[in-house]
Image (cartoon, rainbow, N blue to C red):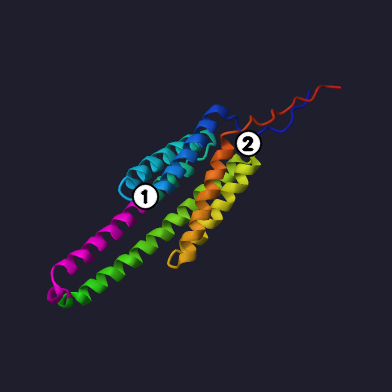
């Protein structure tokens, strides 16, 4: 009696679907939060937590620990970049509030600080884009046996995250990042409806 080639590792389909729901909701909340003042920060935090929970579950079920690890790095570095921009804006406003004479005397130093912060934020955004590129590329590969549609969407998200982060210094970069997020949202939505993969059959002896 011969055995067919071994199939993909068994996964908990219910857990994959739950992860899909969390990732779907998390990205939507984070996206809405980026456009809403004040309470938007809370929405973004909740969204990122849900996204990390989703990717943690998928990382375990799909036997690829780098999915969660890279996503965690991306979130931490992204927060650092946001803090840099926020600090720079407040520093700029502080210089303006100190009076015209003080502003002029500190202009060279202020300009250097602003330029340095912009460069640092851009470099961090490229690093974050690369990490998300890897996260969604690995997801695309691992979920292919479960959902080809989700795999295609995550692969597109991986591509647009990387290109968008490189072009973030111009407006088109932000548009491409938005496309990447939408593709990832659709990919997580597809995971909510996955079915168990076909089981390998045992060939009967003649």
In the image, residue 185 above or below residue 192 = below
> SS of the residue at dot 1?
loop
Compare residues 181 and 7 and report the one nearer the observer.
181
Write down the quadrant of residue 89 in the picture.
bottom left
Task: Note whether 159 is above or below 119 in the view shown.
Answer: above
Q: Earlier in the sequence, mark 1 or mark 2?
A: 1
Is residue 84 shown left or right of residue 57?
left
Percent x, y for residue 62?
54, 36
| Residue located beneath label 2 in the image | 146
Number of marks:
2
Q: Which x, y percent locates residue 196?
A: 64, 29
In the rendered structure, the answer to whether residue 18 lies left or right of residue 80 reads: right
Indicate which label's residue lies in the foreground, 1 or 2: 1
Highlighted magenta segment, given as a residue range: 77-103
Secondary-structure class at tag 2:
loop
> To which residue does mark 1 refer?
36
Residue for point 69% across, 30% down: 198
Q: CA distance from mark 1 to mark 2?
A: 35 Å
- Residue 94's spot in the image, x, y percent? 18, 64
Most foreground residue, 48 or 143: 48
Q: Residue at x 50, y 50 (%)?
A: 181
> Foreground residue, 64 or 196?
196
């Amino acid at each position: 009696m011969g055995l067919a080639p071994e199939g993909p590792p068994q996964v908990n389909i219910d857990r994959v679907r739950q992860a899909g729901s969390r990732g779907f909701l998390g990205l939507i909340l984070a996206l809405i939060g980026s456009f809403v003042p004040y309470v938007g920060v809370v929405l973004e935090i909740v969204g990122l937590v849900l996204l990390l929970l989703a990717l943690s579950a998928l990382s375990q079920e799909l036997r690829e620990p780098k999915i969660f690890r890279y996503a965690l790095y991306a979130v931490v570095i992204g927060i650092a970049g946001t803090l840099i921009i926020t600090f720079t804006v407040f520093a700029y406003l502080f210089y303006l509030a100190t009076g015209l004479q003080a502003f002029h005397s500190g202009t060279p130093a202020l300009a250097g600080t602003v330029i340095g912060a912009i460069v640092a934020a851009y470099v961090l955004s490229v690093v974050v884009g690369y990490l998300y590129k890897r996260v969604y590329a690995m997801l695309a590969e691992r979920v292919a046996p479960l959902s080809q549609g989700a795999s295609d969407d995550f692969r597109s998200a991986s591509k647009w995250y990387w290109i968008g982060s490189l072009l973030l210094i111009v407006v088109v970069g932000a548009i491409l990042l938005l496309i990447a997020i939408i593709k990832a949202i659709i990919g997580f939505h597809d995971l909510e409806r996955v079915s168990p993969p076909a089981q390998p059959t045992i060939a009967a002896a003649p």
